[in-house]
Amino acid sequence: MVLYKQFNKQAKGDEAYAGLAEVMGVMKNKQKQARKEWPTMKKYQASPYLRTVSAPELGVAMVYHALYGNPRIVNEEGLWFLDIFKEPVTMAEAAERCDRDPSDVAEEFREIFFLVEPSVNEKEFLFQKRAQGLARVANKETVDRMGLAISDSCNLGCGHCIHFQSESNNGASLPMYQKPANQLNMSWETAKQCVDRYVKLMREGGKTLCKIHFGNAEPLINWSVIEKVLHYSESIEGMEFEFAINTNLVLMNREIAETFKKYRVRIATSLDGTAHANDAIRTTKNGRGTFESIIAKFDLLVEIGYPLDGFSITVTSGNFNLVDTDIIDLAAGRGMTSIAFDYDLVSLIDIPVKTRVEKLMRIKRYADERGIAFFGTWDSPFRNITSESLLTGDHAFCAAV
Ligand code: SF4
């Protein structure tokens, strides 16, 4: 009997390896139906896009389709069965080599393109999807959110900040973003025009939910415009709004916090470790640490009944040795549920990848044990192949898709 388990968005860690027999039971009814339609005399082969990541110590492997995702945990018998199809064979020929009727599992593998007819061009489907997608872009059907670059300036002076690289950067070192010379803050006139055009576009597309994000460097520098956008949006009839902001929180006072709560503005913020780790890199323009002021704002949000779910951590060479599991304890102690952890892509080149991975995995295991979702751009490839398949929907790491 071939056993395998489907990944899903919730499956994490060892759970993915558990309960294989149970999954098989759940699938039985569906498979019985499918078996009737299985064309036993047609030839099939394992897709050339199948990829296998083995875990011999567990007696299983993760098999996925390099174009469509759809990973499955497959046991040794399952791998043996797939191996029968390394050359095109009919189902009847494959069945002869098995001691039991394998058509149920074969049908499942066929549905997710693990087994394909030799003549099938599997890329063709993606070409068609791309053409359909581009047509939807041209028709303006794919727009669903708007980001407002509220401010290009910041009250802090973090050394790793992409917004404030020295003007002398000649492009030989990343990042290359140069701060704009003239206007740093978006005017209300510009913001209003953006909202009006966005709402018009959404109405034309028959959509009633608008999503607005306030961003760039530190948007609270330009709070008055954010506040106007919130009030103005509320006055627009026939539309619902969702708001989000990326902020370092330091400029947030009680009034701003209450406004966030009133408009249910989702807050994305950063804390780069506990006191020493954070203060090594997240600093004021004078180089002073910011841990105390950020924690005070966490507390303010708790006080007004609008607590944060979590925060992001950036790790650079400046705080690599200082970031540890104590940040998970801090989050768990505050009832938080998620941490986005990312290594700075530029400053860490002196620390071997192996050392970085070991630290990352150790903290992740610790977070998993405490019920904290721990993710970042480092696990995006894995989340991409284990989330929705391109066979059934659009998905990618980049929201612009
Ligand atoms: S708080 Fe954010 S925008 Fe401001 S300096 Fe630090 S990294 Fe840059």
Image (tube, rainbow, N blue to C red):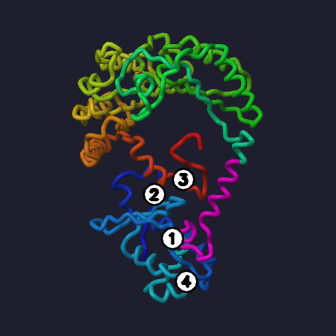
Earlier residue among tags 1 and 4: 1
Label 4, secondary structure: give it.
Answer: helix
Q: Where is residue 364 in the image (x, y as percent from the top left)?
A: 31, 43
Label 2 or label 1, whichever comes before in sequence order: 2
The residue at which mark 2 appears reads as: 7
Q: How many marks?
A: 4
Extent of the magenta region: 109-134
Residue 83 sits inside the magenta stretch: no
Q: What residue type is labelled 2?
A: Phe
Instruction: Please rate how many residues cluster around mark 4, counting C-alpha atoms within 10 Å: few if below 14, some from 14 to 19, many from 20.
Output: many
Residue 121: in magenta span: yes
The residue labelled by disc 1 is 48
Element type at mark 2: loop
The answer to whether 245 is drawn above or below residue 40 in the figure is above
Q: Is residue 369 visible?
A: no
Q: Mark 4 points at which residue?
A: 91
Q: Is residue 232 visible?
A: yes
Magenta segment's dominant SS is helix
x 31%, y 69%: residue:
59
Residue 388: assigned label:
3
Q: Position of residue 294 (x, y in %)?
A: 35, 19
Q: Provide the secondary structure element on which disc 1 rests.
A: loop
Give the spatial CA distance, label 2 vs label 4.
26 Å
Residue 306 image point, x, y percent: 45, 22
